[in-house]
Amino acid sequence: MKTEFAKDALAGRVILVTGASQGIGREAALTFARHGAAVVLLARSVKGLEKVYDEVVATGAPEPAAAPLDLLNAGENEFGNLALTIQREFGRLDGILHCASHFYALSPLSNQTIEEWMNQYRINTVAPFALTRACLPLLKAAPDASVLFVGESHGLHPAAYWGGFGASNAGLPYLTKVAASEWEMHANLRVNLLTPGPVNSPQRNRTHPGEAKSERGELADLMPHLLYWLGGDSRGRSGEVVELDLRKPQS
């Protein structure tokens, strides 16, 4: 896979990024903007969105849009209104990067509650489906559209104590395959799942608090992969589940 991209690699594209106020979502939004995309920033925190919005503007990129939305409580109307807003403000949508994620704590199944499971499924599985569905008419109308789910390794490899978080992420490979199958007749539309592995992010700090940063990959090393999957280079590839390991070899 290529690692160098032209500054205008995403020029003319409008890309929606969820979980955009921190971690992978924030870094991706800034990277997409630097490569010419108009980004729609979605997160729950208004203050966090304002900060990233200003950072994007400072890059000199096309003016972004901020969309405060609580995915835990959003329903049909909220998702539909967001799609209408994107249509009104930009007239198009060329991609969605699903980075938003919800995690409680590592614990045995005997300690996990129904509410924890429901909330993690709501954000990690249901919201990506519902948001993609609401935006599907815009994506179908785009000349080249990409949907990329960002997963977590325990959604692919079950392990003790990951319970509801792992199970909710396990729904993403299924969602990816189903959507890819249903969209086969649309040559301009693709959907894939990328699992970054251990990277320096706020979520990794929560799931692995004792892990040294040197044992993780860097967000900067993940960005070429996101540029590839959200840009035109990945056209024709759909329904793939890609697992990365960006850690540097220890000397």
Image (tube, helix red, strand yellow):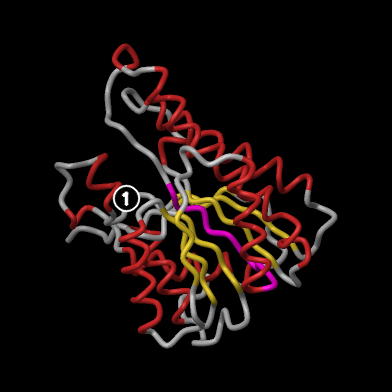
At 77% across and 65% down in the image, what residue appears? 188
| Residue 210 shown left or right of residue 219 in the figure | left
Residue 242 x %, y %:
53, 51
At 43% across and 24% down in the image, what residue appears? 117
At 72% across and 64% down in the image, what residue appears? 236
* 194 is higher (above) or lower (below) than 7: above
Q: Quadrant of the C terminus?
A: bottom left
The residue to which callout 1 is attached is 198
Q: Name the magenta segment's main secondary structure.
A: loop
Q: Is residue 170 magenta?
A: no
| Residue 202 shown left or right of residue 194 in the figure | left
Q: Which residue is at the far right?
A: 185
Residue 221 x %, y %:
36, 67
- Count numbered badges in the picture: 1
Work out whether residue 205 or residue 75 is closer to the camera in this orientation and state it.
Answer: 75
| Residue 41 shown left or right of residue 90 in the figure | left
Q: Mark 1, residues whose alpha carbon is within 10 Å: few (<14), some, or many (≥20)?
A: many
Residue 202 x %, y %:
27, 51
| Residue 109 shown left or right of residue 39 in the figure | left
Rendered image quadrant of residue 138: bottom right
Residue 6 x %, y %:
51, 86
Q: Amino acid at mark 1?
A: Pro
* 49 is higher (above) or lower (below) than 197: below
* 73 is higher (above) or lower (below) than 244: above
Rendered image quadrant of residue 129: top right
Q: Is residue 96 magenta?
A: yes
Work out whether residue 136 or residue 46 is closer to the camera in this orientation and state it.
Answer: 46
Q: Which residues are magenta?
A: 91-100
Work out whether residue 245 or residue 98 is closer to the camera in this orientation and state it.
Answer: 98
The kind of secondary structure element at disc 1 is loop
